[in-house]
Amino acid sequence: MPKKTIKIVVEGGNVKPGPPLAPTLSQYKLNIGEVVKKINDATSQFKGMSVPVNIDIDTDTKAFEISVGIPTTTSLLLKKAGAQEPSGDPAHKKIGNVSMDDVVDVALMKKPSMTSKSLKSSVKSILGTAKSIGLTVENKDPKDLVKEIDEGKYDDLLSKYEEKWNKGA
């Protein structure tokens, strides 16, 4: 019973039965329409976001399972900001603003895939992504907030979420 896993990144709820997915699936003689429908159903709550998906295929029986990962940090931040795409010039062109609560929320969602040991370090990592895509946080440069976190200015806010973080979000 040989198994094969195909790893792809798709736009949530908007997978089309064409290249590059269709040729890959046809190698395993799968019903492409059925696979696409299952992926779209499984990713519908992430509409418009980039989502990693694994398709596990039993090459003997042609049975398959879809497992959906967590959207990219960039996709989650863009959704929180109501922006469509990252800034092409994040140093000069800002595309939106998010709250510190939004940043913490993204850090909690991304916990399973992050290597950070603490909520504080995860939040600082998310702030780095926010800066790189042209977002402000609390109407400030995310780099300034990293300094403020190091100074302890957000310890009260972070402690509110610490229990969720320790439980695995």
Image (cartoon, grey):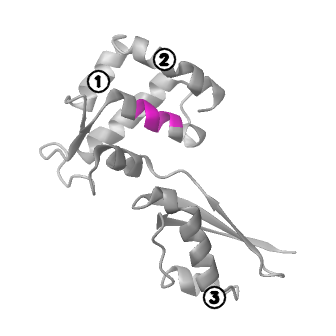
User: Where does label 2 land, which residue?
Assistant: 160
User: Where does label 1 land, which residue?
Assistant: 145
Find numbered disc 3 in the image and state the secondary structure of the residue it sits on. helix
The Cα–Cα distance between marks 3 and 1, rounded to whole angstroms, is 49 Å
Name the mark nearer the viewer: 2 or 3. 2
- The percent position of residue 6, horizontal first and vertical second, equals 63, 70
| Above-or-below relation of 78 to 141 | below
- Which residue type carries mark 1? Leu
Please name the residue shown 54% across and 69% down the image.
Answer: 40
- Which residue type carries mark 3? Ser
Residue 25 in magenta stretch: no
Find numbered disc 1 in the image and state the secondary structure of the residue it sits on. helix
- The percent position of residue 71, horizontal first and vertical second, equals 48, 52
Name the quarter where the C terminus is drawn. Answer: top right
Name the quarter where the N terminus is drawn. Answer: bottom right
Q: Earlier in the sequence, mark 3 or mark 1?
A: 3
Please name the residue shown 20% across and 47% down the image.
Answer: 95
User: Where does label 3 land, which residue?
Assistant: 26
- Can residue 77 be seen here? The reply is yes
Please name the residue shown 49% across and 81% down the image.
Answer: 20
The Cα–Cα distance between marks 1 and 2, rounded to whole angstroms, is 18 Å
**Circles 2 and 3 in contact, beta carbons < 8 Å:** no
The number of callouts visible is 3
